[in-house]
Every structure is written in C-alpha cells, then in structure tokens.
Amino acid sequence: GPATVMALQVGAPGDSRATFLPYRTIARPFCSSLSDDEEKKALLQQGQKSVDELASEVGCTGCLGCLCCPCNLIMRCCAAVLTPEINHLFSGSMNKFTCFKEIE
C-alpha cells in the first residue's frame, strides 16, 4: 500500500536510485532568509555529516576549550546521541502538516 516518508530525498552517488537522509537543523541568517537553493544545500550538508562530525562542531575551542573541558565533553557526547533529526516512515498517504503533527 501507499507510504509517506518524512526525510531528505537525495540521489545516491554512482546509483540511479534515490536514498534518504535525515532532516537536521541548519543555521539561518538573523536578518534575512535563505534562498531555496541555499537551504537545500545546507540541509544536504547537515544530513551527510557523520555522528563524529556533528560532535566535533559543538563546544568551545582554543583557550576557552581548555577552561571548559568538562562542559565540552558533555556537549560532544550529547551532540553525538541527541542530535535533532527527522527521519520517519508512515503507512498511508499523508501531507506534511499531518506528518509533523504525528511526529510531535
């Protein structure tokens, strides 16, 4: 029967079939907005990151990194395990608003 996938659809390299990546949060400009192409590129970059890459992006660096070592360690562990992402499969045909309501 029909199914609804709530994820980021991308083409697999070297393969004619598509695959899915998780939606993850992206940085957005404070006073302006992203164009559709910029948003798609940012979503793709975030979806392709490994758990190690996501963990390495959080925390303080430089001198502050040394001073905040325990905090950095906790933040890296949490980023590796608790990264917000959307990757769901629903049975039946659903619109995006219904999918988000179900995910809540």
Image: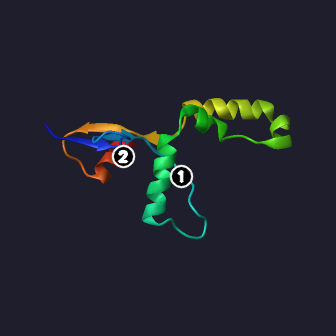
Identify the amino acid type marked 1.
Ile
Q: Secondary structure at mark 2?
A: strand
Residue 77 coordinates in the image, percent (x, y): 64, 29
- The answer for how far apart the CA atoms under marks 1 and 2 are is 17 Å
Which residue corresponds to mark 1?
Answer: 26
Identify the amino acid type marked 2.
Val
Residue 27 position by quadrant: bottom right
Q: Residue at x 50, y 53 (%)?
A: 42
Residue 23 coordinates in the image, percent (x, y): 44, 45
Along the horizontal axis of the image, is 11 left or right of 48? left
Which quadrant is the N terminus positioned in?
A: top left
Residue 10 tag number: 2
**Residue found farthest to the front:** 14
Q: Residues within 10 Å of mark 2 (few under 14, many from 20)?
A: few
Task: Choose the circle earlier in sequence order: 1 or 2.
Answer: 2
Q: Are marks 1 and 2 in contact (CB under 8 Å)?
A: no
Q: Is residue 58 above or below residue 35?
A: above
Along the horizontal axis of the image, is 25 left or right of 95? right
Residue 85 coordinates in the image, percent (x, y): 46, 41
Q: Secondary structure at mark 1?
A: loop
